[in-house]
């Protein structure tokens, strides 16, 4: 982390140059942008502000419109409606080569007939940079992504990880005001992907640049981004920090899309101070904290993340636990899934529902582990529950 | 053990078959032609001498060998008619190939960028003319280009000309015929490379600041060079030896080598000179063929 690499000066220059807009104003403002292909509305009225220096992730299942939105930012698609303001200037109809934005393509799109050096220099030559400066900048970029000695290779003489680095260096070489990354890690294997995630974050922080990444991998988005926009059917379903997205999802769909969740449908029964009681057919009456945003009286759903659910053995020992927790549900262990760091238990509740509990394996020996068909109490606090409009 | 099994009997035969084919149908006939080109014309059956007669004994065979000479080749070099015919053939082939590339490239590019199902339709449209005889298609062009033909009628009706233009028996007519006939041979290899190319590469170039015409010259065109090479050679080589189209559409004042060959063979009954002309033509065409071979090898070594 502390390793000082050449290219650190890039950060200083970028921050000092025109890449830094007036304080307070967002670097990028997307206003009611829409795009229709035939009869399919790929992007359906998206509005979003992105500040300079942010690492923003567009997260969503395939076909949700995230890539189309990214391509509109790059100028590869023209929006049918709306405005895209970069530093206050509308660029919605500008051609790709006229924008101070660069993109790292999925599968990299390296030019197969050009060497690593010429791939990286491509954008610099188009910008009319003097030869000597191009050589310096290319050397800087090659060092930045640790590709020294491979400058003369052609893309097909590189490994997948090396190609990914060339693509990154090529996109960064012009020092764009905004870097777009379309599933940049999808083609890498798991270990390499994790290392590269860390490197990308470090790079973004050091260069002080604004990154927008598109991914369908929620873990990737959570790890890297400072803010996440979840997209569904061409719309932004929620824009929030990773923590907020996970702990306070705004809809049932988001709760299910981001991470694992237990969901119980039910109806609001009574209000007790700052607490709400919701009657569910599958888990009985659940006491939950009153949500920040007022919910209607109609059908609701209670969401509890599996790691918030605690398990205890039934019997006198657990009675103490039963008192501290208002929501204590009796059941039997129906399924056990050992994952190394944690174990996921499926508890068949006596009330009929199924509840997942994720328990950390904090001791090496399995003295605490539960066995199949064992009778247990599953409990959680009202604050661990999220009430969602069903 | 397992590596040997690859070369089991049927496979071995398959590997040898092309060579057997080449020897039987190319090298052996080529030997005949080479021998005739070294002979002298004669009023006889066959119309040249000496004739190798294996039954006449060793001495007669030796005498026949001694009678062979390179006089015909000397004639080809010294007589302007032949030199001119070669130069004209190469000029026509070069010009026509350049025209074909200029016309074929945009068509192939357009085809490769069509939606998938329309690409198949476009492909059929390119290939459909092959279903009609080549000769009939050239005769159709004579119909179109003649004095009161379709082209002149249209031009007159549109008041673009006041009297019929002479098209037939001109180089223009010949170039129309050649470009028309060879266009599929230019389009298909170009289309094959362009369709294989990922459009995202062009997007990447645009994203990196290249305006559309630069995207074409820096990315699209260099990546389509294998197709350009194949298309150019597929057209250039047969056009050099083209006989039918210049004979039917061009004037008779300047002959291509194919026409000269025909004249020597059928009108003058001079088989030896015709054979010599054919061999020189083959040698001339060997140069672009070898060039292409080397180009492809280099591309293979560089890994595309």
Image (spheres, coloured by chain):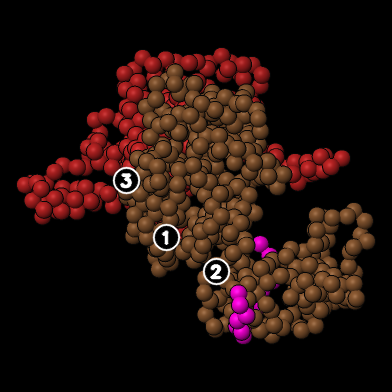
Chain colours: A brown, B red
Classed neighbour count for the residue bearing mark 1: other residues with Cα under 10 Å, few (<14), some (14–19), many (≥20):
many
Q: Is residue A263 magenta?
A: yes
Quadrant location, the C terminus of chain A: bottom right
Query: Furthest residue to the front?
Result: A273
Residue B287: which disc? none
Query: Over which residues does the magenta segment extend?
Result: A259-274
Classed neighbour count for the residue bearing mark 2: other residues with Cα under 10 Å, few (<14), some (14–19), many (≥20):
few
Q: Tell me the residue that label 2 is attached to.
A: A292
Q: Secondary structure at mark 1?
A: strand
The front one of A129 and B262 is: A129
Quadrant location, the N terminus of chain A: top right
The front one of B179 and A10 is: A10
Tell me which residue sits at (87%, 40%) in the image: B1
Instruction: Give the prevailing secondary structure in the magenta stretch.
Output: strand
Q: Are marks 3 and 1 in contact (CB under 8 Å)?
A: no
Can residue A100 be spotted in the picture? yes
Which is closer to the viewer, label 3 or label 2?
A: 2
Tell me which residue sits at (19%, 53%) in the image: B150
Q: Tell me the residue that label 3 is attached to.
A: A89
**Residue A15 in the image, given as x and y percentages of width and height:** 45, 33
Residue A46: which disc? 1
Tell me which residue sits at (43%, 56%) in the image: A48
Q: Secondary structure at mark 3?
A: strand
**Residue B40 in the image, given as x and y percentages of width and height:** 46, 21
Q: Chain of mark 2?
A: A
Answer left or right for A154 relative to A102: right
Note whether A301 is above or below A124 in the view shown.
below
Which is closer to the viewer, label 1 or label 2?
A: 2
């Amino acid at each position: 982390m502390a390793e000082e690499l050449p290219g650190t000066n890039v950060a200083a220059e970028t921050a000092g140059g025109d890449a830094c807009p007036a304080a307070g104003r967002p670097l990028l403002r997307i206003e009611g942008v829409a795009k229709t292909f035939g009869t399919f509305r790929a992007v359906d009225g998206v509005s979003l502000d992105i500040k300079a220096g942010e690492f923003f992730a567009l997260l969503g299942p395939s076909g949700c419109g995230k890539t189309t939105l990214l391509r509109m930012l790059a100028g590869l698609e023209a929006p049918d409606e709306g405005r895209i303001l970069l530093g206050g200037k509308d660029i919605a109809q500008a051609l790709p080569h006229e924008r101070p934005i660069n993109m790292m393509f999925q599968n990299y799109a390296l030019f197969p007939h050009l060497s690593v050096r010429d791939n990286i220099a491509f954008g610099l030559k188009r910008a009319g940079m003097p030869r000597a400066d191009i050589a310096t900048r290319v050397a800087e970029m090659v060092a930045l992504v640790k590709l020294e000695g491979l400058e003369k290779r052609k893309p097909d003489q590189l490994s997948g990880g090396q190609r990914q680095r060339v693509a990154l260096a090529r996109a960064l070489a012009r020092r764009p005001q905004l870097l777009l990354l379309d599933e940049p890690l999808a083609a890498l294997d798991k270990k390499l992907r994790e290392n590269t995630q860390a490197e990308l974050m470090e790079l973004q922080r050091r260069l002080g640049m604004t990154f927008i990444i598109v991914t369908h991998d929620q873990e990737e988005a959570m790890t890297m981004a400072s803010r996440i926009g979840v997209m569904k059917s061409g719309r932004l379903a929620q824009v929030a920090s990773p923590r907020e997205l996970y702990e306070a999802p705004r809809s049932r769909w988001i709760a299910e899309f981001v991470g694992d969740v237990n969901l119980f449908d039910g109806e609001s029964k009574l209000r007790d101070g700052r607490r709400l009681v919701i009657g569910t057919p599958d888990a009985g009456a659940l006491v939950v904290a009153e949500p920040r945003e007022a919910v209607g009286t109609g059908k609701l759903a209670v969401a509890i993340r599996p790691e918030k659910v605690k398990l205890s053995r039934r019997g006198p020992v657990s009675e103490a636990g039963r008192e501290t927790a208002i929501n204590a549900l009796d059941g039997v262990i129906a399924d056990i899934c050992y994952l190394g760091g944690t174990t996921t238990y499926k508890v068949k509740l006596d009330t009929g529902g199924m509840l997942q509990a994720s328990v950390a394996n904090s001791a090496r020996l399995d003295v605490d582990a539960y066995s199949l068909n064992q009778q247990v109490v599953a409990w959680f606090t009202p604050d661990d529950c999220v009430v969602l409009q069903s | 053990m397992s590596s040997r099994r690859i070369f089991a009997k049927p496979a071995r035969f398959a590997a040898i078959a092309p060579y057997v084919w080449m020897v039987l149908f190319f090298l052996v006939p080529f030997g005949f032609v080479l021998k005739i080109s070294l002979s002298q014309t004669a009023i006889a059956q066959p119309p040249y001498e000496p004739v190798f007669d294996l039954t006449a004994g060793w001495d007669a065979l030796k005498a026949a060998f001694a009678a062979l000479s390179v006089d015909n080749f000397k004639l080809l070099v010294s007589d302007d008619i032949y030199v001119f015919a070669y130069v004209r053939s190469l000029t026509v082939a070069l010009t026509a190939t350049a025209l074909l590339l200029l016309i074929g490239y945009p068509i192939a590019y357009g085809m490769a960028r069509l939606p998938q199902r329309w690409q198949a339709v476009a492909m059929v449209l390119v290939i459909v003319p092959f279903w009609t005889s080549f000769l009939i298609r050239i005769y159709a062009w004579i119909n179109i280009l003649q004095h009161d033909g379709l082209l002149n009628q249209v031009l007159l009706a549109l008041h673009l000309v006041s009297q019929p233009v002479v098209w037939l028996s001109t180089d223009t007519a010949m170039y129309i015929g050649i470009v028309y006939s060879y266009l599929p041979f230019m389009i298909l290899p170009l289309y094959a490379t362009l369709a294989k190319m990922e459009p995202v590469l062009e997007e990447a170039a645009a994203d990196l600041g290249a305006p559309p015409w630069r995207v074409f010259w820096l990315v699209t065109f260099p990546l389509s060079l294998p197709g350009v090479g194949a298309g150019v050679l597929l057209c250039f080589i047969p056009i050099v030896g083209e006989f039918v189209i210049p004979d039917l559409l061009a004037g008779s004042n300047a002959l291509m080598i194919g026409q000269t060959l025909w004249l020597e063979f059928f009108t003058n009954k001079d088989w030896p000179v015709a054979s010599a002309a054919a061999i020189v033509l083959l040698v001339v065409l060997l140069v672009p063929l070898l060039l292409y071979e080397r180009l492809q090898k280099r591309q293979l070594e560089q890994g595309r």
